[in-house]
């Protein structure tokens, strides 16, 4: 209580001393006002730009994780990543459901085959089977037409989306929408054309692509029949899907006689799940990637019943290079802004020191008087220090207002992205107070060292 | 008699490079509680130095100084500041009021350095009371530039009184005032001296002023003398 009263009085004394010369106080604090305003405006505009750069880089797929089945090994010979068939579409659903750091998930199967339209043909780099969320994961947009639907995936509908390159190669200016193309003699209706994406970081043409429901690709195109995929499924259900579309039925003569339902019930065979080639996962942000990796690992180990200590039967890859580029861009941006901010604040601080020195000289008699009536050196030091800090804090708050207003103006007039940054505001307050302390200290110290006799006689 | 000031064989020597300049050469004096004393001497006589020592602004090179029974000669700077705050009131020739600050705030200023036990309201009330006592109760909010010289000096006296010190040191209190306002200020000192029993020490070179004191101490060349050279006790000295 007593302490609070004393500090309040010190503060009031400082304020009164400053208000005795309001013009000078204003000019003194101008350096800090401009410095802090610059910091706040730069920080807000910078944060906005940084966020939009991050968004752009994220569009390039920096947030995408690629989950692949692990390597199969036999007698010391490994067959490379993706050679086991342990990933299932249900895994993808589980990841989406249980991982909080994940924004979107797309199961993926791929194949390579000839595509025919009319008298033209082409072998695209990728024929992907996926779900509608594939476009979401890849930040891809539909150029014209519509996207796939979940119903297409559930039904194994023969619809597809074409990349720009394929449209050019197969259709030559014709409108592809609604036309039928054939992949391995299975006809697909083109429902949409993908937006242009260009080459990826490896130099591969990403527009040389067909995207269809993964069920269609898996069961109809790659020839993996449902009975292949799930050997325990009854053969009666498998043939219905199979024979529908195969122009040249791939029914090979069965090695074993078909099992009846009673046999299957009596003697169940181990279930072999429908496997997919990849699961693409998009993390919520670049910063969430490590969390996403942890969560996915946990979910998959649990689902695949992998005991602690055993190796994963899958692998997760992130776009480390891109993430690094993203992080370094952001860091560099922040550092640059920080450097600019520091310079302007130091300049402001030097201004404060200058004026405080002048003020100490000018108020020598006042200092002498205060000492004569009982001010200790400590009191004088405190008074001038508090004056400097008050100046800086007032300047700081004016600067925050001005800077924020400035960045709002920039957003309104130039339509630049701007983000309010509470951290920058807090930093500005702390920095302006410390500038006051640091640059106010020397003049205050000088004042406190005055000899009261000399000071009283000073003209 | 109760002695408020007791100094014995005070020496003060300034050093100018290698040369020692003795200013006070062994001064001993007493001032009784409730006395009103004038300190006279030509410029360079050492009276200002003596005043500074009495005011605890400076320390003697040697000698003993007791103020109110306490030894002052070997206090630290901060301790002396506390003594100045509690026991002494200063009145200066040039008033030394804070510019662009109301009379009230000027008077209340020394309270800033007293322990913060007084609330803001109480401080203002006391300052207003002091101003009323010096006859400026109507001008609490006036700034020094709006006051006449005599009024300014009265504000300064109110400031000296705010901590209720037993001793007031006035350094040429009328030096910047005309004769009429000088009389006013001196009358005020006399009232304080007679009614409140405050000890007052005035430095002056004006015998007219010195006449208001009960006792005059003459200083010449760093020593106390009975009378100033070339001056008759009852006759005003004419100075260039």
Image (tube, coloured by chain):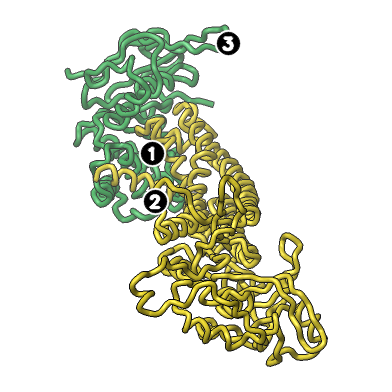
Chain colours: A yellow, B green
Marks 2 and 1 share the same chain: no
Residue at left 52%, top 39%?
A: A438
Counting from the top left corner in percent of width and height, residue B128 is at: 27, 50
Q: Is residue A23 visible?
A: no
Location of residue A424 with respect to A75 vertically, above or below = below
Residue under pointer 3:
B17
Counting from the top left corner in percent of width and height, residue A183 is at: 70, 81
* Circle 3: element type: loop
Q: Nearer the viewer, residue A10 or A23?
A: A10
Please give left or right for residue A26 compared with residue A174 in the image. left
Name the subunit of mark 2: A
Counting from the top left corner in percent of width and height, residue B240 is at: 54, 26
Residue at left 21%, top 24%?
A: B33
Q: Nearer the viewer, mark 1 or mark 3?
A: 3
- Residue B182 badge: 1
Q: How far apart are marks 1 and 3 (CA)?
A: 41 Å
Q: How many labels does the image show?
A: 3
Considering every residue shown, the one lying at the far bottom of the view is A178
Name the subunit of mark 1: B
- State which tag comes first along the sequence, 1 or 3: 3
Q: Which of A366 and B229 is in front in this view?
A: A366
* Circle 1: element type: helix
- Residue A307 badge: 2
Q: Which of B150 and A55 is in front in this view?
A: A55
Location of residue A220 with respect to A71 vertically, above or below = below
Q: Can residue B43 be seen in this view?
A: yes
Please give left or right for residue A394 compared with residue A66 in the image. left
* Circle 2: element type: loop
């Amino acid at each position: 209580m007593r302490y609070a009263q004393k500090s309040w009085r010190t503060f009031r004394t400082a304020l009164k001393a400053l208000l005795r010369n309001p013009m000078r106080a204003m000019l003194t604090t101008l350096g800090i006002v401009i410095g802090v305003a610059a910091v706040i405006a730069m920080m807000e505009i910078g944060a906005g730009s940084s966020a939009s750069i991050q968004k752009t880089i994220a569009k390039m797929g920096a947030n995408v994780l690629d989950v692949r089945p692990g390597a199969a090994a036999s007698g010391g010979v490994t067959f490379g990543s993706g050679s086991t068939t342990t990933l299932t579409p249900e895994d993808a659903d589980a990841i989406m459901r249980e991982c909080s750091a994940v924004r979107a998930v797309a199961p993926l199967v791929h194949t390579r085959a000839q595509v025919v339209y009319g008298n033209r043909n082409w072998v695209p780099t990728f024929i992907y089977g996926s779900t509608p969320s594939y476009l979401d994961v890849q930040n891809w947009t539909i150029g014209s037409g519509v996207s796939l639907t979940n119903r297409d995936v559930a039904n194994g509908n023969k619809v597809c989306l074409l990349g720009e390159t394929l449209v050019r190669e197969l259709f030559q200016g014709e409108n592809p929408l609604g036309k039928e193309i054939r992949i391995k003699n299975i006809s697909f209706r083109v429902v949409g054309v993908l937006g242009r994406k260009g080459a990826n970081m490896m130099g591969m043409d990403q527009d040389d692509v067909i995207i269809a429901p993964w069920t269609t690709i898996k069961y109809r195109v790659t020839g993996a029949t449902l009975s292949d995929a799930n050997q325990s499924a009854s053969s009666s259900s498998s043939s219905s899907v199979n024979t529908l579309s195969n122009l040249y039925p791939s029914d090979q003569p069965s090695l074993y006689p078909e099992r009846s339902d009673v046999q299957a019930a009596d003697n169940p065979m181990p279930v072999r799940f429908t496997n997919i080639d990849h699961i693409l996962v998009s993390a919520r942000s670049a910063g969430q990637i490590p969390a996403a990796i942890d969560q996915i690992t946990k979910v998959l180990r649990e689902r695949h019943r992998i005991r602690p200590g055993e190796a994963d039967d899958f692998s997760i890859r992130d776009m480390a290079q891109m993430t690094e580029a993203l992080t370094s861009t952001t860091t560099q941006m922040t550092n640059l802004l920080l450097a600019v901010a520091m310079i302007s604040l130091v300049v402001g601080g030097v201004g404060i020191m200058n004026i405080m020195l002048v003020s100490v000289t000018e108020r020598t008699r006042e200092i002498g008087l205060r000492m004569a009536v009982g001010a200790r050196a400590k009191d004088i030091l405190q008074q001038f220090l508090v004056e400097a800090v008050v100046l800086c804090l007032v300047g700081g708050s004016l600067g925050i207002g001005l800077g924020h207003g400035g960045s709002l103006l920039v957003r309104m007039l130039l339509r630049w992205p701007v983000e309010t940054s509470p951290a920058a505001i807090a930093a500005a307050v702390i920095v302006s107070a410390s500038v006051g302390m640091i640059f106010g200290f020397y003049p205050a110290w000088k004042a406190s060292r005055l000899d009261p006799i000399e000071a009283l006689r000073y003209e | 008699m109760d002695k408020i000031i007791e100094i014995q064989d005070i020496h003060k020597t300034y050093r100018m490079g290698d040369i020692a300049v003795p200013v006070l050469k062994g001064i001993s004096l007493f001032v009784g509680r409730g006395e009103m004393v004038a300190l006279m001497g030509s410029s360079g006589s050492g009276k200002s130095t003596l005043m500074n020592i009495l005011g605890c602004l400076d320390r003697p090179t040697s000698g003993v100084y007791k103020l109110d029974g306490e030894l002052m000669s070997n206090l630290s700077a901060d301790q002396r500041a506390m003594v100045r705050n509690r026991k002494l009131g200063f009145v200066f020739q040039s008033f030394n009021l804070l510019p662009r600050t109301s009379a009230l705030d000027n008077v209340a200023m020394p309270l800033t350095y007293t322990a913060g036990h007084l609330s803001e309201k109480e401080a203002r009330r006391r300052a207003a009371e002091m101003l009323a006592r010096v006859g400026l109760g109507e001008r609490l909010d006036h700034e020094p530039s709006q006051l006449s010289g005599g009024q300014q000096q009265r504000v300064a006296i109110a400031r000296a009184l705010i901590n209720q010190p037993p001793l007031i040191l006035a350094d040429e209190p009328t030096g910047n005032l005309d004769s009429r306002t000088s009389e006013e200020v001196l009358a005020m000192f006399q009232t304080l001296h007679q009614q409140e029993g405050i000890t007052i020490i005035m430095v002056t070179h004006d015998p007219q002023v010195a006449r208001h004191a009960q006792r005059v101490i003459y200083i010449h060349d760093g020593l106390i003398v009975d009378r100033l050279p070339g001056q008759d006790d009852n006759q005003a000295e004419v100075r260039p």
